[in-house]
Image: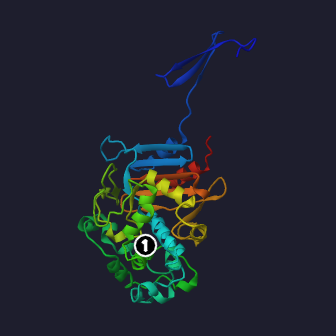
Amino acid sequence: MHVPGRRRRDLLVLSSLGAVIYATSTGTAAAKLPQADPLQQQVDAVHDTGAVGVSAEVTSPDTRDIAHAGAAERGTRRQMPLNGRFRIGSATKTFTATVVLQLVGEGRMSLEDTVEQWLPGVVQGDGNDGSQITVRQLLQHTSGIRDIGPEIPALENADGYRAERFRTYTPEELVGLAMQLAPDFSPDKEQWSYSNTNYLLAAMITQKVTSRSWAQEVNERIIRPLGLKDTSTPGTFPFILGPHAQGYAFSTGTDVTVLNSSMAVGSGSVISTAHDLNRFYAALLGGRLLAPAQLDEMTTTVNAPELGVRYGLGLAEIPLSCGGSYFGHRGELLGYIAWGGATRGGTRTAVVYVSSDGGQDTQQAMMTLVDQELCLTRS
């Protein structure tokens, strides 16, 4: 449309400068530089804290943004893979809780069932009493049962890792070790303490209820229905197949990529990608995996002072700086640390992971990234 009095503008795109210049017939010109990508800025900020490699993905119904920084292998120029696989650590707990809540919804078990009902004689000794601990308390970390993590040499230091990275544990063996430790508190004290042992027991109960392994249930109920093709339950297999970054841990920066993660069945052993995790969170919070009653149970939270957040059943509720909150879970298993989650309803998701312990500010920068991206409204 011709507008009287308006001079014609010629649009010149100078791609070599990355700028768009609007030149008018009067000879004046104005340069308009492209705005920096907010996600890339946040990823760069995480990398600047000392992480070897960083990768993040943010999704909404009509967008998928990806950014990465750093190297996939220390001392090289190999870029972080576009959709790299990594050990998601404790984000596995959300998978386990989802399976348990599906079984509850099917009427095959109850959150008020005791551990003793399903695993007679397993939780006892040194003050531990499975007859006083419910499935709900396992998933909510209000059981008082001690965390077995610090008892695993491979997770504690470089020497322990080198000595035991191929060692296979059974859940029964691990729970037996935990029973040699006095509980942090009695389950009737309404206290909270994070414990991987809770989720080892939840995996064992899953097998008891279904007569199939925890891994089979996760695959059949979550991974296959959602088409999470880059997500797996590796069992005792110590390698990460497919594109992935090397993982580094401890003050020595030891390469810890190879690991038999059998010590983390139910609690931290799943391998996935940022993309698959986003799809999982969107489906979970969007009501595709759990009936409304079970999703309400999962997202009903109690104070978790150790984490500085509120915690439901395998899912944390984390406040957003823009108001409201999101649901997600931190994940860490030797060399890989992840933060991620979704807004209520699952309409917007964000996941970021690093391939090393990073520096003292790394995890705060990761939390800031997720917060800013879930607060960000894009057209």
Residue 130 lies left or right of residue 150; in this view the side is: right
Q: Residue at x 58, y 49 (%)?
A: 372
Residue 33 vertical placement versus 66 (above, below):
above
Quick check: 61 above or below 8?
below
Looking at the image, residue 252 sits to the left or right of residue 217; the answer is left
- Asked whether 16 or 314 is in front, the reply is 314
Q: Position of residue 90 (x, y in %)?
A: 44, 65
In what quadrant of the picture does the C terminus appear? top right
Residue 233 lies in quadrant: bottom left
Percent of width and height locating residue 342: 56, 56
* Nearest to the observer: residue 220 or residue 20: 220
Residue under the image location 62 percent in, 56 percent down = 320
Tell me which residue sits at (53%, 20%) in the image. 13
- Residue at screen point 36% across, 62% down: 334
Quarter of the rendering containing residue 76: top left
Q: Helix or strand or loop: what does disc 1 sit on?
A: helix
Q: Position of residue 137 (x, y in %)?
A: 52, 79
Residue 82 position (above or below residue 132): above
Question: As displayed, is residue 133 above or below residue 154?
Answer: below
Q: Quadrant of residue 291?
A: bottom right
